[in-house]
Image (cartoon, grey):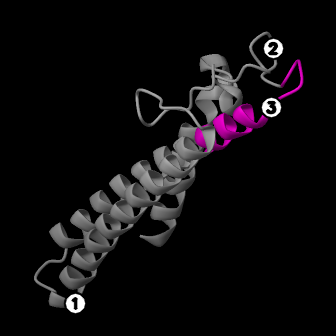
């Protein structure tokens, strides 16, 4: 069961991070002014502090995507363990603990995202809307 979990997590990591590399966007350079003309995704002119904040925000968003996928997978794995416990209280408790830990981990990830987003928003020095995006223009 652990091998299956590890394989699923690696597939989730690949899926979460491969979309920008396959041309769906510019990856971590999305919404920066210094990479606006770049086809390869890297900067084409000097980046400033606001661009650094945007890159950091993009990385945090990718990590949140990964955490969401991983938590969802672990909730499903925990539920499957509980379903196939076959009356074993120990296996049922293991599945329940897996689901609980996944939910707690997701809550920690969301709170962390909120805190980091607010700090980055504060550092940009502008009253931006929507609140969770950096806008230095």
Q: Position of residue 118 (x, y in %)?
A: 48, 48
Distance between the Cα atoms at labels 1 and 3?
A: 55 Å
Query: In the image, is residue 16 above or below residue 83?
Result: above
Q: Nearer the viewer, mark 1 or mark 3?
A: 3
Does residue 31 show up magenta in the picture?
Answer: no
Q: Nearer the viewer, residue 29 or 100?
A: 29
- The label on residue 103 is none
Which quadrant would the N terminus be assigned to in this image? bottom left
In the image, 52: left or right of 85? right
Q: Nearer the viewer, residue 95 or 16?
A: 16
Query: In the image, is residue 71 above or below residue 129?
Result: below
Q: Which residue is mark 1?
A: 90
Task: Give neighbour class at mark 3: few <14, some 14-19, many 20+ (Cα, 10 Å).
Answer: few
Q: Which residue is mark 3?
A: 48
Q: Nearer the viewer, mark 1 or mark 2?
A: 2
Task: Give neighbour class at mark 2: few <14, some 14-19, many 20+ (Cα, 10 Å).
Answer: few
- The label on residue 38 is 2
Q: Nearer the viewer, residue 32 or 97?
A: 32
In the image, 71: left or right of 37? left
Task: Give neighbour class at mark 1: few <14, some 14-19, many 20+ (Cα, 10 Å).
Answer: few
Which quadrant would the C terminus be assigned to in this image? top right
Residue range in magenta is 43-59
């Amino acid at each position: 069961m652990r091998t299956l979990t590890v394989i699923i997590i690696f597939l989730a990591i690949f899926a979460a991070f491969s979309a920008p590399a396959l041309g769906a966007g510019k990856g971590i350079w999305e919404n920066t002014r210094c990479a606006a003309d770049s086809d390869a995704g890297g900067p084409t002119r000097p980046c400033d502090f606001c661009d650094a904040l945007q890159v950091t925000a993009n990385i945090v968003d990718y990590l949140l995507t990964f955490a969401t996928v991983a938590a969802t997978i672990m909730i499903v794995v925990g539920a499957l363990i509980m379903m196939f416990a076959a009356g074993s209280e120990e296996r049922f408790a293991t599945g329940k603990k897996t689901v609980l830990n996944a939910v707690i981990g997701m809550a920690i990830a969301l709170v962390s995202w909120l805190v980091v987003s607010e700090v980055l928003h504060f550092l940009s020095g502008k009253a931006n809307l929507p609140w969770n995006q950096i806008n230095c223009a």
